[in-house]
Amino acid sequence: MRNSVMAAGILLLLASSCSNDKKDKSATDSMKVDTTINTVDTAQTKPIDSATAAKAWETYMKPGNEHQMLAQSVGNWNAEITFYSPSGEIVSTNTGIKAETKMILGGRYQQSTYKGQIDGMPFEGVGTTGYDNAKKVYVSTWIDNMGTGMMYLEGTFKESTKMLTSMGSATDVVTGKVMKVRETLTFADDNIQLMDMYDTKDGKELKTMSIKLTRVK
């Protein structure tokens, strides 16, 4: 359930705040993620006939095998969320968090809704995951009530390891700067999924959070 993709996102921001120190300008710059949006220069491109454009859109909007794989995570899950210190020690472990996953918009996207408590505080979060047929990557977003930003990730799935590895960016809540994040989601079996979240500080990658998802039978 790539939803994980999910609780990871902004939850990561909670963990990362535990290890934030003042950074000098060069260290901050080294962590910046290129957020430039690639656009098409319409003045340079050749005209595309309507039949070609229609075919492209038909391919882009049609759910495929990747979307069917996302649909396998539909259902209810228990989430155990653990946060880590910069030295790798466990800061806290939160249980009793519930996640409901469903497919929306004609099976094109997976949506996961989380509810529970994080370190004694009411918690709600929403994650979406899809597969972009044009870019040929998995894409995911995460928002929750413990922040006002959004995490965005793009990733690829490796069948041999049953792992989805995603890279992206989120906001460092202490500095307000963009930081690099990496997430791995391993499908241990049909009923257990394991997520690990990492961020980069001063050029060093640190594990900040993990989630164990267990399907409710």
Image: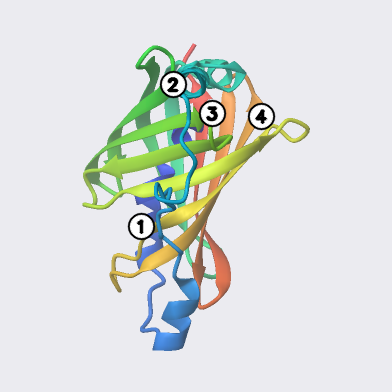
Marks 2 and 4, how far apart in space? 45 Å
Within 10 angstroms of label 1, few (less than 14), some, or many (20 or more) residues?
many
As drawn, the label of residue 133 is: 3
How is the protein colored in the picture? rainbow
Residue type highlighted by circle 2: Ser
Q: Is residue 61 left or right of residue 88?
A: left
Q: Earlier in the sequence, mark 4 or mark 1?
A: 1
Residue 59 or residue 41, whichever sits in front: 41
**Which element carries disc 2, helix, strand or loop?**
helix
Residue type highlighted by circle 4: Ala
**Residue identifier under label 4:** 188
Q: Earlier in the sequence, mark 2 or mark 4?
A: 2
**Which element carries disc 1, helix, strand or loop?**
helix
Query: What residue is shown at x 57% (from left), y 17% (from top)?
Result: 64
Give the percent coordinates (x, y) of residue 187: 63, 30
Give the percent coordinates (x, y) of residue 72: 54, 16
**Which element carries disc 3, helix, strand or loop?**
loop
Residue 101 occupies which quadrant of the picture?
top left
**Residue identifier under label 2:** 50
